[in-house]
Image (tube, rainbow, N blue to C red):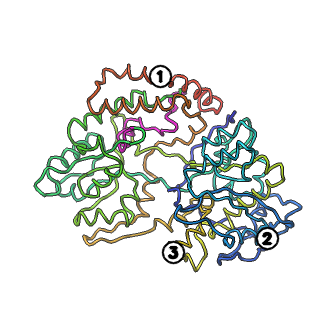
Amino acid sequence: MRTRTVLTRLTVLTVFLLVLAACGGGGQAGTSAPAAPAGGQAAAPASGQAAGSTASSNVDANGKFKTPQTIEVMATVRSSELAPPGADWIVAKAVKDQLNIDLKMTWVTQSNEYDRLLQTRAAANDLPDVFLASPTVVSNLAPQGLLADWTPYLKFMPTFVTEREVEKLKPIGTFDGKLLALVTKTPDPYKQSVMIRKDWLDKLGLQVPKTLDEYLAVMKAFTEKDPDGNGQKDTFGWSAAVDTATGRLLRFNPIFGAFGAEFDTNYPWRVDNNKLVYVPTSNERRDALQFIAQMNAAGVIDADWKAQKDEDFRNKWKAGKIGIWFEDWCAGFCSGNHDPFAKANPTGRTIDIDPPVGPGGKSAVSFWTRLNAARFGMSQKAAQAGKGEAIARFMEWLNGPGNTLTTFGEEGKMWKREGDKITVDQANDYRIVRALSAWSVKGSEEELRSRYDQTTSYPNGENIAVWDILQRAQKIAKVDTTDLAVLPPAPSAQAADITRLQAEGEFQFVTGQRPFSQWDAYVQSLKAAGVDAWQQAAEAKAKEAGLIK
């Protein structure tokens, strides 16, 4: 059972799984430094010697093991187009030189096979020493006694624990009082925003909309008043799509947010007046669906939205047919992504704006969680074999002395510093060196600037500074679902039915195929399909975690 500790709200900047992260590579002062690793980056003292850590008798003053250690690390390669690193992998050499740890790497070349292969090894009681695992895999392995408790080893990885907010996120990886999964903050920034055609606003003499009513008025103008000036009725105020796998509505998140009805599909709950509310069947969700139905009936949504995929949605706004849309801001503004729009719309200008404010004053562009998508696991066999300290010191090395090498590659050869950011050469050998970068990225400003600090000028005079957009996105109103990660997933036997019924129902309501007078019947069908049982289990966990009393 998980701990009762309540997760505190997390308020620092964040940042696309392969996006880059937190200041200060973890170097520590006051100890003698080991030899610089291959690759040219300055070596910091080994992580276990940082303030607050505890040295063991098998580690020298620099944090290097006196006797060789071997740990098996299981990971996916950075790109399925590339072979795994060979025996001369520079990262393994640096770990050996600085820590006296031999890395035995088990590479999975197809990421979609990773969970299956990991669970196959678990079934044979042959888990690798340390590995990444999805929340579902962790939940499956935890009751089997195959995972080690990380708690005794956190003292050997102090900067990792601090910079990745391990203490705050402990409840999510704790089972029966043991920290069986090392849960860390995401290294990615918040990536969603609302975008609007500023040139269309200017042409029609309109202001940036703020409320839902203002949004709807602008959508109608963009649909009916020929904002592109081609004399044809071929523009729309909004666009959306339908998830091909689940049938769920896509790209309406800011509308749901304006009613307090946005939720994380993994954790579809909110805590309201000491009650756990299942958001999909709430009155707020119904009200939001009614507004979307109003948008659909008014014809302001791209006419093809009910049958189009997400890639079709993106093609529409890039072609210049949509006036307002919800999108990943990098997909809209990073140079390679904005270029097709700029080419198709030579005079077009796009800006990011706040999500609409609803009738009750609520506003949220989408949901957000501080959690990474995966958790680090240590096998019980590794701990029993005395490998726990070596694993912990390796993790600390990834966060500190080895961070730039593992994240960016070799300094001077694969990256260089230009002012306050790192510029990376995107060659194939760079990707091979970075094969373990999913373990090392941590969300520092240095990492983030290496990817997002770009300003692009276009022939129409538009200058897009992506870093400014990133910073605004971190401050925008959003629904934080981090605390809810302690709650159980939908019952496996009923999960598919719940998803199907919800997706079908919402689609039918917003398209006018089903009247809202049938809302109560719809809610009852979801409850009968398994939501009632799920709610009971979720409420029990919420009480254990202190989310409700």
Image quadrant for the C terminus? top right
- Residue 443 falls in image quadrant: bottom right
Residue corresponding to mark 1: 527
Give amino acid for label 1.
Lys
Magenta segment, which residues?
A: 247-274
The numbered mark, 1 or 2, whose residue comes first in the sequence reads 2
Q: Is residue 150 visible?
A: no
Give the residue furthest to the bottom.
Answer: 412
Q: Secondary structure at mark 2?
A: loop
Query: In the picture shown, does residue 485 fall above or below 97?
Result: above
Residue 425 is labelled as 3
Measured from the top left, where is residue 146 in percent x and y?
Answer: 74, 42
Q: Is residue 98 visible?
A: yes
- Residue 492 falls in image quadrant: top right
Residue 31 is labelled as 2
x 17%, y 57%: residue: 228
Whether the magenta-drawn stretch holds residue 267 is answered as: yes
